[in-house]
Image (cartoon, rainbow, N blue to C red):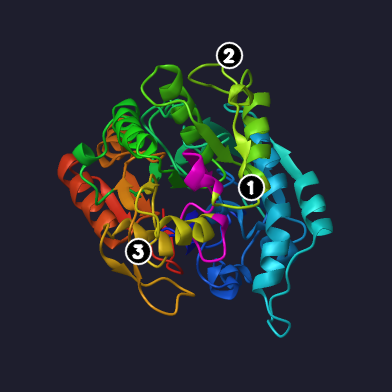
Amino acid sequence: MIQFLPLGGAGEIGSSCFYLNIDGTGIILDCGMHPRKNVQEALPMLEHLNDKDVDFCIISHAHQDHIGALPYLVRKHPYIKLFSTPQTRAIAELTLHNSVSILSDKLKENDLLKPYSHEEIDLLIQSINYKSYNEEFELRGTRSNSPLPVKVSLQDAGHILGSAGILLEHNDHKIFYTGDINMDDQMLTPKAVLPNKKIDTLIIECTYGATDSASLPGWTQEAKKMATDANKILEAGGSVLIPVFSLGKLQEMLTTIWTMMQKGLLIKTDIYTGGIGRKINILHDRNRYVVRRTDKDFELAEIPYKDIYEVDNISLFRRNPSIVLAPSGMVIEGTLSFNLALDWLRQDKFAIFIVGYMDPDTPGYLIASSEKGQKLSLPGLLSPLEIKCSIERYRFSSHAKRDGLLEIVKRLRPEKVILVHGDEPSIDWMGYNILEKNPGIKVYAAETGHKIEL
Ligand SMILES: [Zn+2]
C-alpha cells in the first residue's frame, strides 16, 4: 500500500514537504521552509509525522523552500537517514550555516521553537548520504512489511546546481517527483533529463501553470532585450540593480551579463555582487566537469566582478555606472537588495531590473508591479516614496513553462498525477489541461494534511 501525505508546499509555493509511506517504509521528499512567513508558520506540518513511520528523507535541491526546515525534522526524528546529490549537500552546508544567525535574529526568547546551532548543522551535513545522478540505491524502513526494498535514483532536474527529480520504484509501481524542474536550457544549466521509463504516479510542480508559455521567451532572446535596456541606463550615467537569489539566479545572471559583454551587446562596465553567492560560484566551478553544463570549460571565476559588501558609500554608483546583483531576490526588508532599492528608487537615471519570481507579499512584488512616477509604500518608510528610477521586468525562468510541464506528463505516461508547488490558478490550469489531453488519467490537487492513497 502506498500513501502520499503533503505536509507543506501543496497548494502554494512555500515549505515543500511530502510524506510517502510505501508498504511500511516512510520516506519524506523535501523539507522546506517558507521564505517569507515568520518561522513558526514557515515550517511544514511535521506534527503529522508523530504517529507515522519516518525512516528516510530525500532532498531534491538546496533552495530554502525545499531544505530550510531539515534541521527541525532531524531534531524531531534523529534517526532519520538523509539523501541528496553531492552538490546539494555541499550547497546546503553553506546555506544552512548561513541561516543560523538569520534564524536566531528572527526567533524571540519566548518562542517555542529554538534556533538551530552550527554544531547541529555540522552533524546534519555529515549525515547526508550523497548519491550521484542515476546511481540506484535501495531503502527499506525498519517496519517495512514488504520483502522488497524501494529502489531510488536521482535524475538531473535542470533547475539549479545539484537539483534532482526523485524516482522511486517498488513492486512494479514507479513514482517520480519532479522537485523544481526546468525543461529549457538556462545560461549555465542545461534542461532536465527525464526518466526513460513509464511512470505510474507523477508528482509534479506547477509554478508556471497560470503563465502563458508565449510570455516566457527563450533565455538568449530575453538577455538581448535586457542588454539593450541596460545600455541606455549606463550610457545616461545610471546604474542597474538586479535583485537575485544567491543560489541559482545569481550565477545564471552573472554569466548572462558577462556573456552579453563578451559578445559586444552590453557595455563593459563594473559588475558588483558578493555574499554567500561568491562561495556558491566556487561550487559551480568545482563541479563543472562532474555535472552537465552548457559549457564545461567556462568558469565563473573568469568574471572580474567586485564585492558589493566592500563598497563603503553607495554614492559610488552615481559616479560610476555599474550593474549590481544583490540578494535577496524578493527584496525582503533588511536585506542588501532592499537597502539598495531604497536609494535606487530615488535616482532618476537608475533602473531596477526584475528577473525572477516574486511572492505577492514581498517588497519585491510591490516594486515589480510599480512604474516610474508612481508612489510606492514600502516597509519601514514613514510616507510613500515617489519612484524616480525605471523599473523593467524580464522573464528568466529556472522552472518549466506550462507547455514543458504538459510535455513531462506526455512523455512519462502516468496513470495518476499529483499537482504540487503552485498557486490555485496554476493548479487549476494544469489539472484541466492534463485531463483534457490524457483521457482516463487521474489527477489530484494535493492539499496539505490530506492523504492520498495510491
Ligand atoms: Zn527551487
Between 341 and 402, the residue placed more toward the observer is 341
Between 65 and 433, the residue placed more toward the observer is 65
Helix, strand or loop at mark 1: loop
Residue 356 part of the magenta-drawn span = no
Q: For the residue marked with disc 3, what is the amino acid?
A: Leu
Give the crowd class for mark 1: few <14, some 14-19, many >=20 residues within 10 Å. Answer: few
Farthest left residue? Answer: 436
Q: For the residue marked with disc 2, what is the amino acid?
A: Asp
Marks 2 and 1: which is nearer the front?
A: 1
- Whether residue 248 is situated above or below residue 326 in the rendered picture: above
Residue 67 locus on image (x, y percent): 60, 53
Whichever of callouts 1 and 3 sits on the residue coming sooner in the sequence is 1
Helix, strand or loop at mark 3: helix
Q: Is residue 277 left or right of residue 118?
A: left
Q: CA distance from mark 3 to mark 2?
A: 39 Å
Marks 3 and 2: which is nearer the front?
A: 3
Q: Is residue 142 visible in the rendered structure shown here?
A: no
Residue drawn 31% across the image and 50% down it? 390
Residue that numbered label 3 is attached to: 366
Residue that numbered label 1 is attached to: 311
Q: For the residue marked with disc 1, what is the amino acid?
A: Val
